[in-house]
Amino acid sequence: MRNKGLSLIEIMVSLILLSSVMAGIAGIFFAGKRHVMHARDRMAGGELGKSFLDPMQMQVRQDTWDSVGNSLTPNITPATSPVVKVDTVDYTAQYDVKAVTSKDLRKVKVKINWTEF
């Protein structure tokens, strides 16, 4: 007479195989989620960098041009590290304003910092 059931060893082997496959799938899921969160934080940082620069556009006017050297006077000062909170992430901006030597231009560089979890 032949038994049609499964032995304990066969069940244990199948459970070990199933758990290793599920652990691999869970690892892929968590790595993908971490990648999506990082990309979201980078996109938010870029948009916030643009929003930090927008108020500076109002300071660039024709009446701030120097009549001697025809260059923009350095009345645009770096801001004091504004902090914006999006969801649970704090974004901090730092400005750096430099004159371009060969032209009558100013170069504004914004650095956005945040801490990822």
Image: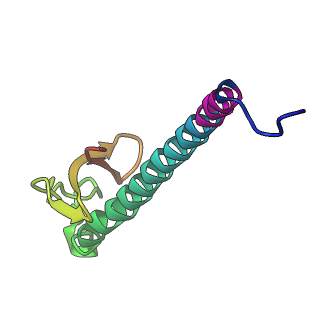
Residue 58 image position (x, y, % from top left): 25, 75
Which residue is most to the right? 1
Residue 41 lies left or right of residue 28; in this view the side is: left
What residue is rendered at 66% in x and 33% in y? Answer: 11
- Classify residue 65 by image quadrant: bottom left
Which residue lies most toward the left here?
A: 80
Image spot of residue 100 (x, y percent): 36, 44
Q: Which residues are magenta?
A: 10-20
The structure residue drawn at horizontal position 32% and vertical position 63%, both measured from the top left corner, is 48
Q: Is residue 103 left or right of residue 13?
A: left
User: Residue 90 or 94: which is nearer the viewer?
Assistant: 90
Residue at (70% x, 30% y) in the render: 7
Q: Is residue 10 above or below residue 116?
A: above
Image quarter of residue 19: top right
What quarter of the picture does the C terminus occupy? top left
Q: Position of residue 96 (x, y in %)?
A: 24, 46
| Quadrant holding the N terminus | top right
Tally the marks. 0
Nearer-the-camera pick, 98 or 79: 79
Q: Is residue 105 left or right of residue 21?
A: left
- Please determine whether, in this image, residue 52 is positioned above or below residue 28: below
In the image, residue 6 above or below residue 34 = above
Residue 59 lies left or right of residue 27; in this view the side is left
Residue 39 horizontal/vertical position (percent): 48, 52
Query: Which color mode does the image show?
Result: rainbow
> In this view of the protein, which residue sits in the foreground, 29 or 64?
29
Decide whether the magenta segment is chiefly helix, strand or loop. Answer: helix
Task: Let me know if residue 14 is in the magenta part.
Answer: yes
Residue farthest to the front, as pictured: 1
